[in-house]
Image (spheres, rainbow, N blue to C red):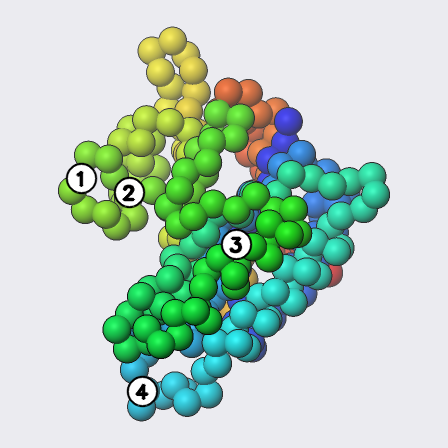
Amino acid sequence: MKHAMIPDTQIFPESKTDHITAAARYLKKHKPEKIIIIGDWWDMPSLSSYDKPGDKGWESKDVQADLDVGWREMNNFLKTLRTPKYDPEIHYCLGNHEQRIVRASASAGMRMLNNYLSIEELIFNPLADLGVHTYDFLEIVELDGICYSHYFVNPSSLMSNSIGGSIENKLKNLGHSFTMGHQQTKQTGEIYTCTGQRRRGLVCGRFYQDYHEYLGPQKNAQSWSGIMMKHEINNGDYDLMEVSMEYLLKEYG
């Protein structure tokens, strides 16, 4: 059993996207049985709660344009990936950037757009029509002993934000093999139970080429970008292989 995990792509209208097609070509060749897209495929900058009317670039942001570019790349990805002989199981975990649609539709200032800003109509139902299994924001899906979600909260804390700390800290608090995106970093690690069972943790939240202003020059330069392959999966344990952005563009771009 092989899984492929695609971290946050955060696609917006000006994004570079040739790596999306490169990833599809790579996966079509290596044929993982299950592909997990960890969320934040759509960046949705037009619905960012941090931007206010009058902020720089605010007047040029467009909800429909944000949706359209994400759907264009999703359709291209699936069209490139699937063949009559290869049709993998695909799972999509909704991210906090797609969740912006939910927050916007529930806000007092935009309640008149509630019928138009529907996460079901804009994301969930179209993905289901494409044969993609889709999960709500922070819903956990367990596949072959590995828990997947866009991110996890610390069950030992009263806070609902993303679990922090080292990968060993995350594993000890979550108590299960897990994989998440969200954080623009790469963490991998393992712990063993008293019976010798290995539990594996993976955090990887970047699969894009774009420069993001909010990260600044240092974090943009320090963040690894690529996809993850998990081989020989057995009850939450696996052999991990990193596939970098540079490799994908060079060999499959």
Instruction: Give me the C-alpha separation between circle 4 and circle 3.
Output: 29 Å
Instruction: Give me the C-alpha separation between circle 3 and circle 2.
Output: 23 Å
| Amino acid found under the numbered disc labelled 3 | Phe
At which x and y percent is residue 112? 35, 76
Instruction: Give me the C-alpha separation between circle 2 and circle 4.
Output: 32 Å
Instruction: Give me the C-alpha separation between circle 4 and circle 1.
Output: 36 Å
Residue drawn at 31 percent across, 36 percent down: 170
Furthest-left residue in this view: 158
Please indicate whether residue 109 sits to the left or right of residue 35 in the image.
Answer: left
Front of the two marks 3 and 2: 3
Query: Quick one: label 3 or label 1, which is nearer the N terminus?
Result: 3
- Front-lying residue, 23 or 225: 23
Residue linked to disc 1: 157
Query: Quick one: label 4 or label 3, which is nearer the N terminus?
Result: 4
At which x and y percent is residue 7? 51, 51
Residue linked to disc 4: 53
Residue linked to disc 3: 124
Quadrant of the rendered structure where residue 77 is? bottom right
Please indicate whether residue 237 sits to the left or right of residue 27 in the image.
Answer: left
| Amino acid found under the numbered disc labelled 4 | Pro
The label shown at residue 200 is none
Residue drawn at 29 percent across, 48 percent down: 162
Furthest-right residue in this view: 84
Front of the two marks 4 and 1: 4
| Amino acid found under the numbered disc labelled 1 | Ser
Query: Quick one: label 2 or label 4, which is nearer the N terminus?
Result: 4
- Front-lying residue, 126 or 143: 126
Residue linked to disc 2: 153
Instruction: Give me the C-alpha separation between circle 2 and circle 1.
Output: 8 Å
Residue 59 sits above or below residue 64 on the image? below
Q: Crowdedness of circle 1 by 10 Å Cα count: few (<14), some, many (20+)?
A: few
